Image (tube, rainbow, N blue to C red):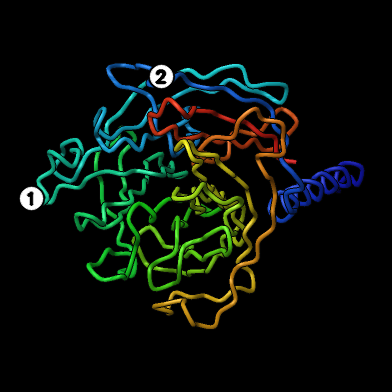
Amino acid sequence: MFNIKKIVPLLAASLLLSACASMRADAPIASLRLIGEQRIALKQPFNGTLIGGLSGIDYDAASGDWVLESDDRSEFNPARFYRASLNYDSNGFSGVTFNSVHFFKQANGGNYPNLAHARLDRGDQVPDIETIRVDPKDGSLWYGSEGNRKVGLDPFVAHASRDGGYLATLPTPPMFKVSKEELGSRNNMSFEGLSFSADGNSLWLGMEAALYQDGPLATPEHGSVVRITQLDLAGKVLAQYAYAIEAIATAPAPGRDADNGVSEILAIDDHRLLIVERAGVENAKGQYTNHVRIYEMDVAGATDIKGLPALKGAKYVPARKRLLLDLEKIGLPRVDNLEGIAWGPRLANGRRSLVMVSDDNFNAQQVTQLLVFEVL
């Protein structure tokens, strides 16, 4: 005979867990609360390398390490990533400890060379690694490089072992290849964002800026559009969506540069992603001001554009977007070139944590900052 007094509480607990799981998956993010900031000194030495150019970050749940890659094009040291510990809780962010450094390897087993020493005729790649993710199923690494249009190198996504050893290169759509004509990826504006899907079975790949055939770059007067592509782990395109970039927040000084693009992406669930839009605006002295905003992108109801070779003049429905956070409005003394974003472990109160990192370009006028947020 069953005991109703035991069954009812168990059933209630089961329903509560189910409801909580549903809320975690589907509830919109209301806001992000800044927990704290830490900075890393310019060209801080570590195990024979210089720390800097940190443009990608991810959390390795199995080891408890944070993986941070440098976009050093093997100029200071060979292309590499670091494993580190971040000490934070809901009350504060108290420190960063670097634990190890690892060098990415090419298919031939060697380190990536810089452009001056690359043998392009022998298949060398010149690295410009902008994003990195830990495979949630086996702890291996996936990373994206922007290639080098000027010397005919295509952007690529590579699969590596936990220590950076080469495993494979992911096939990516031909539309992203560089060309001698005005087609394909622009120089230094291609594979900037990478994220595992929420179920860990596929990858989202984000372009920094528009393909030539998709339209012009963003300006202070008008926005632009980029492609966000979902691929399985063998490189098959599952879907592709258009994401509209905002116009640049302010105008540069006369004769100076400004841009706005996607610096990273991060999946929330099966149809929503966080998108980091990062603009850099140059003043008359050659110094840059960064405008960084986090948006929620929702592909539900958007047109799958994987069959459209060009977006310029085409009819399609872009993904919806919602401003989640303007980094200039949260009281930070400075907003630098934030390029990496990743989910961290849950806080003691059960809420998710979120971490961002900036790329200082090994430049004394910039800083490397790490920011920790509580997800509300």
User: In what element is the residue under mark 2?
Assistant: strand
Depth order, front residue of 225/237: 225
Question: Does residue 50 appear anywhere in the picture?
Answer: yes
Report the residue at 52% width, 75% height from top.
Answer: 304
Residue 185, x across and y down, in percent: 34, 62
Amino acid type of the residue that numbered disc 1 sits on in the rendered structure: Arg
Label 1 CA crowd tier, 10 Å (few <14, some 14–19, many 20+) = few
Amino acid type of the residue that numbered disc 2 sits on in the rendered structure: Asn
Label 2 CA crowd tier, 10 Å (few <14, some 14–19, many 20+) = few
Report the residue at 30% width, 49% height from top.
Answer: 158
Quadrant in the picture for residue 86: top right
Work out whether mark 2 precedes mark 1 in sequence or the reverse, and give the earlier one. Answer: 2
Residue 108 against residue 61 in the figure, above or below = below
Which quadrant does the C terminus fall into? top right
Residue 9, x across and y down, in percent: 87, 43
Q: Are marks 2 and 1 in contact (CB under 8 Å)?
A: no
Q: Is residue 124 left or right of residue 146?
A: left
Residue 256, x across and y down, in percent: 45, 48
The residue beneath circle 1 is 122
Residue 14, x across and y down, in percent: 78, 47
Report the residue at 26% width, 28% height from top.
Answer: 76
The residue beneath circle 2 is 99
